[in-house]
Image (tube, rainbow, N blue to C red):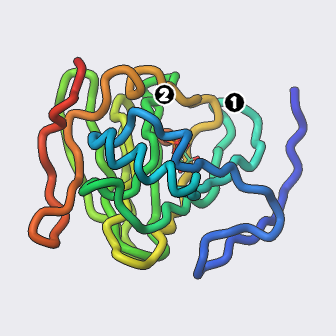
Amino acid sequence: MTTVFPSLHEFNLNNGLSSTREPIRRTLSKMKGMFHDEAAFEAQLANGDSLLYEFYDMGVPDSEKDVAYGTSITYPGKVGDEYHMTKGHFHTVIDTAEVYYCLRGHGYMMMETPEGETKWLEFLPGKAVYVPGRWAHRSINVHPTEPLVTFFAFPGNAGHDYGTIESKGFRKLMVERDGKPTVIDNPRWNG
Ligand SMILES: O=P(O)(O)OC[C@H]1O[C@](O)(CO)[C@@H](O)[C@@H]1O
Ligand SMILES: [Fe+2]
């Protein structure tokens, strides 16, 4: 049995970053095939492999008795008309849930089940989104200039299944229409 000691970590309330741990960073090139406008993606990548989001793995044991937690920071911007977002995933142990609490910014949590139900809920500072087991989830930043900062927690054994989203995509996308965030059917959904 692993012995886990009580620990203390700091996450900055403004930028979401921790002074006590290194984040995992995902740049544009790690998101190939995720945005619906491939030409806009390639054009943007030619201008530099910019940082889209970063988040923390605090290294808690991968046991169902433990709680994985950390902050997730998605930077503002769009690829074509589609807002910056995380890759998104199901949990490998698919019926494990997750909770997110928004600390800064404006965004949405896009969710869907394998059966095809979809749901998106708004992130604003002070709002908590509960993602039940079986719902794939992706954070989306719709603010023009501010980072979307959330704090998340989920069972340590949940794991990340990226394969399903990488091959099928999400059924719904969040794009800008007439200057406003708008949900559309994913024209490239491959279910
Ligand atoms: O794993 P993705 O989809 O790249 O997005 C990262 C986010 O998801 C998490 O894995 C939590 O489920 C966090 O580490 C982070 O908030
Ligand atoms: Fe998750």
Please tell me which residue lies in front, 139 or 8.
139
Please tell me which residue lies in front, 80 or 142.
80
Q: Is 186 on the left or on the right of 30, as rendered?
A: left
Looking at the rendered structure, the secondary structure element under dot 2 is loop
Name the kind of residue labelled 1 in the image: Ser
The dot on residue 63 is 1
Residue 49 % position (x, y): 58, 52
Relative vertical location of residue 163 with respect to residue 20 in this rendering, above or below: above
Looking at the rendered structure, the secondary structure element under dot 1 is loop
Residue 103 % position (x, y): 49, 74
Name the residue: 90% across, 38% down: 3
Name the residue: 69% across, 30% down: 63
Name the residue: 43% across, 30% down: 90
Residue 97 % position (x, y): 44, 39
Placement of the N terminus among the 4 image quadrants: top right
- Determine if the C-beta at disc 2 is less than 8 A from ligand 1: yes
Name, please, the residue furthest toward the bottom: 14
